[in-house]
Image (tube, helix red, strand yellow):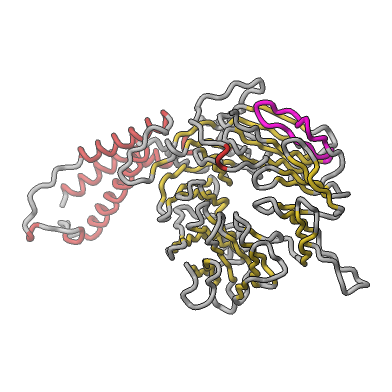
Amino acid sequence: MAPPVPMLAVRGSDGTSLLRGPPECEQHAAFTRDPRLSRCVTFSRDGTFFGWCNGHSVSVVRSSDGSIVSTFDLPKTALLEFSPLNKILITWQPYNKSQDSSHSDANLQLWELQSGQLIKALYQKKVDSWCPRWSEDEKLSVRSVNNELHFYENNDFNTIANKLHMQKVSNFALSPGGQPSKVAVYVPGSKGAPSFVRLYQYPVFGGSSAALANKSFFKADKVTMQWNKKASAVLVMASTEVDKTGASYYGEQTLHYLAVNGETALVQLPKNGPIYDVVWSPNSSEFCVVYGFMPAKATIFNLKCDPVFDFGTGPRNAAYYSPQGHILVLAGFGNLRGQMEVWDVKKYKQVAKPQAPDATHFSWSPDGEYVVTATCSPRLRVSNGYKIWHYTGSVVHKWEMPSGSELWEVLWQPFPDSCFPERPVKYQATPSDLGTTQALPTQVYRPPALRHLPATASSKLHEEEPPQNMRPGVLWEKSLSKSALKNQRKREAKKAAKQELKPEPGPPLEPATITNSQSEPTSGDPETDKKIKNLKKKLKAIEELREQQVSGKVLQKNQLEKIQKEEKLLKELEELQIGQ
């Protein structure tokens, strides 16, 4: 049986439509485009249902044939979500309390999807964490209410089954999967006390030993918490709004690791600067971090928080694993030029390097073969549109919004993991009428004063670091480019030649003959000794300059003049030593 074809929902100023994904890339015949302005669109977790609000009502249809499932008279709805098993539709509209009334309507509503009956209406003022979180089997759900967590069982929202109350729970993350469910909670620090994150297993919340793991830290105004797919560990990125040292515009970030077996660690990042992105591999045994002042580094770490592979430096601020976890895309969007590096993470070999200028959105198709990039409003109000790519760099479909129209959102239809098994990675670009957009080699910025001179290595603003395998005892040459490999071998040969030139160590000297710089023979004339010392210092500096010249560094004019004086200095030193 042929695998299903994922659809792409497109929301913009000209309405909402469904596009059948590659290779067809055609409008879904069974879904009639809604020309009205939609506030939000969403798919159910398994992709069976599609819902949207067009400012008049909320509609839910079957994705396969477009047949209506339910319609709700909720014109002000701003956010939609389905429960994991598609039993409940959750709607949220902005909280509004009228001035002439002390009462306001509940703005968070839970509906039975098939019957359209209201299950529960709740108050949710903040848009952050607006939606309750469910376990995969819907046996447990949790929401944050007034700095404490309320737990419900079997979708019974009239009875609070359990509560987790601490000093001030400001964020939480429920583990993916089924039972037993675990929850990570964050409590910000106050009055000199540190912030902390704790892991609990439902329903064991009481007692000093109830927490599975605990990690405390300073410098945290907010945190983001990510569970891995197997619910065995969580990554916590703590960040401050302001870097008090003034080193970064983005504030300060630190990355912490907590495992359900009690292990905790601070992830050590070898380059200073912001942490742009952190993402778990779908295999749950590795994670990728993009960090450091530009050009940023990207590194894969294992569950011991040891580096496994370093991708070197480059213009990047985001990382995206394919749903199967076999391909990783490192990208530079936003204020960067849209360069994407596509890597086979099993062989650590680069597949392609396409470029999507002005992209504000990137996401993988659930089949792990295609990606979509889009330029959306309001981030950018010009040149709105989207492209569907094969991961080898070929553009298979392109759509540009008409002049005066805006694109607001594109969203892939999700599928269960079992629908799309991993396929072998291709390295040759897939044929396409639209061609590829491989990133061209960028020209290094050169100050006006240097532009009339030949391009040299010294005119680079940053030293580029090549990728390297961090596993101990692994010789990694396969994925280096030819020029990088050649340079690496040159450095190794030069190092070996230096070792050969060093004199063989002779027999140990008698204690009486060992001298140091303070017991060198002197002339008896302090002035002469001072001259000899200065000449030796100058000759040593010249020797260092010669080494830099041999390594390929272009020297300045005054440095070249120093080297030319070497013969004269040697002669002076010889005359002074003869006269001793």
Q: Hey, which quadrant is residue 105 in on the image?
A: bottom right
Residue at (70, 59) in percent of width and height: 131
Q: Report x, y in % for residue 561.
A: 39, 39
Q: Hey, which quadrant is residue 2 in on the image?
A: top right
Q: Nearer the viewer, residue 214 or 277?
A: 214
- Left or right: where 175 falls relative to 380: left
- Left or right: where 194 falls relative to 134: left
Residue at (56, 61) in percent of width and height: 252
For the N terminus, the quadrant is top right
Q: Report x, y in % for residue 18.
A: 75, 36
> Residue extending furthest right?
100
Q: Nearer the viewer, residue 569 or 39?
A: 39
Q: Examine the structure image and report whether residue 43 is included in the region drawn in magenta.
A: no
Write the start and end of the magenta stretch as one range.
13-33
Q: Report x, y in % for residue 276.
A: 57, 51
Q: Report x, y in % for residue 87.
A: 70, 53
Residue at (30, 40) in percent of width and height: 566
242 to 467, vertically: above or below: below
- Left or right: where 72 falls relative to 136: right
- Left or right: where 199 falls relative to 26: left
Residue at (29, 53) in percent of width and height: 534
Q: Hey, which quadrant is residue 102 in on the image?
A: bottom right
> Residue extending furthest front?
115
Q: Main secondary structure of the magenta part?
A: loop
Whether residue 451 is visible, yes or no, is no
Whether residue 136 is visible, yes or no, is yes
Q: Examine the structure image and report whether residue 32 is included in the region drawn in magenta.
A: yes
Total count of labels: 0
Q: Nearer the viewer, residue 478 or 424?
A: 424
